[in-house]
Amino acid sequence: MAALQETEGRQEFSLVLGGPLFQLLRRAHLTDDQLGMVVRRIIAAILIAWVPLLILTVADGGFVDEARKAPFFEDVGFHLRFLVVAPMLIASELLVHERLFPLVRQFESRQLIKAADAGRFADAAAAAMRWRNSILAEALLLVVVYVAGGLFTLHRYRELGAGGWYASGSGDGLSRAGYWLVFVSLPLLQFLLLRWYFRLAVWGVFLWRVSRLDLDLLATHPDRSGGLGFLGGSLVAFMPIAGAHGALFAGMIADRILFTGATLPQFQLDIMGGAAFLLAVFAGPLLMFMPRLAQVKRAGLMEFGALAQTYVRDFRGKWIWGLAQVDEPLIGSGDIQSLADLGNSYEVTRQMRITPISLRAAVNFTAAFLAPIVPLALTMMPAEKLVQRLLDLIV
């Protein structure tokens, strides 16, 4: 029974399978216990955030009004926010749950947690789950969203209102669609974003507490990360969130290109800065293991260096100075194979990374951010010319 309870306790770890909103969605039959019904939640978000904007804008005559600087129909950035970004943030929950849960179990299944630290590891997981389920935390997120909306967003869109689809007919304030945008649609999107950053903070604190444990790491582990290479898989879990941020960037840049005459190269620094920021934020928690991994690498190099010194000295005496038995062959002897194995082990230790992040994982995560922005390159070259150049390369 005790073993069963322990297994069930491990299965409770999830950054997304809990919290007040999760319980509310369950009662509304928009999710099940394992975050199913993703399509229902996406449709509900679109019905709340985007469809009312469409209906109210049509009623106010701002849908395709060419007199407006930014008609609703042409406002690519807003369509991306509520038809792409919000659905991606919602759909990401299931992937994060399914990918991070096995990662956390690896600490125990690989016996990285020593018996003396089992209680502290369980406490770290339990504390993360308490924060995930915090009513106060999500309430504060809502307060931040609406305080920002009252102090900044409302003022900003009133200033930008003239000529936009969210402006009133007289141009001196917001239309009904504009008020829905400021007080419903944008707060929903901002809450989804902030909740992901809150979850990332919970994940970071959990990993920080685990990194303080005396983990049983091996410098010769084939993953070149002391046995923690599996943690790099967390970047794979967060790739859809990186893609959602990329879609936000793409929408912002597309609006500038369409309505102000800007060009894509003008945003090179913004794009590179956004990619670097996201990689730092989502990969940052994994860097907490750097001191421990660096210590393991130093200790491994010293241990294998000392062992190699002793072994090579004996090898020299045996085979170079003629101290071996007369009838013992040199070729194919176990001693030579052992020397090769020792050299391989030392080389693995020497190449060990002091972070659990592989170059491939970092590149894939960055590519997920850049993918929604790449199509904007079409604004620099007509599609027919691009197709012709591709054909020239192929033919």
Image (cartoon, helix red, strand yellow):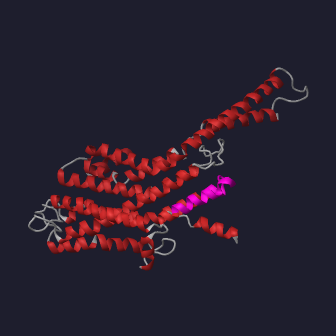
Does 102 appear above or below 341? Answer: below
In the rendered structure, the answer to whether residue 31 lies left or right of residue 2 reads left
Q: Is residue 193 magenta?
A: no
Q: Which image quadrant is residue 164 in? A: bottom left
In the rendered structure, the answer to whether residue 113 lies left or right of residue 319 reads left
Provide residue 216's location: percent of width, then percent of height: 66, 48
Residue 9 visible in the snapshot: yes
Quarter of the image where the N terminus is located: bottom right
Magenta span: predominant SS is helix
Provide residue 260's location: percent of width, then percent of height: 18, 51
The residue under the point 55% across, 64% down is: 13
Does 389 appear above or below 157? Answer: above
Residue range (magenta) = 106-128
Viewer-proximal residue among 349 and 253: 349
Q: Is residue 121 magenta?
A: yes
In the rendered structure, the answer to whether residue 69 lies left or right of residue 296 reads left
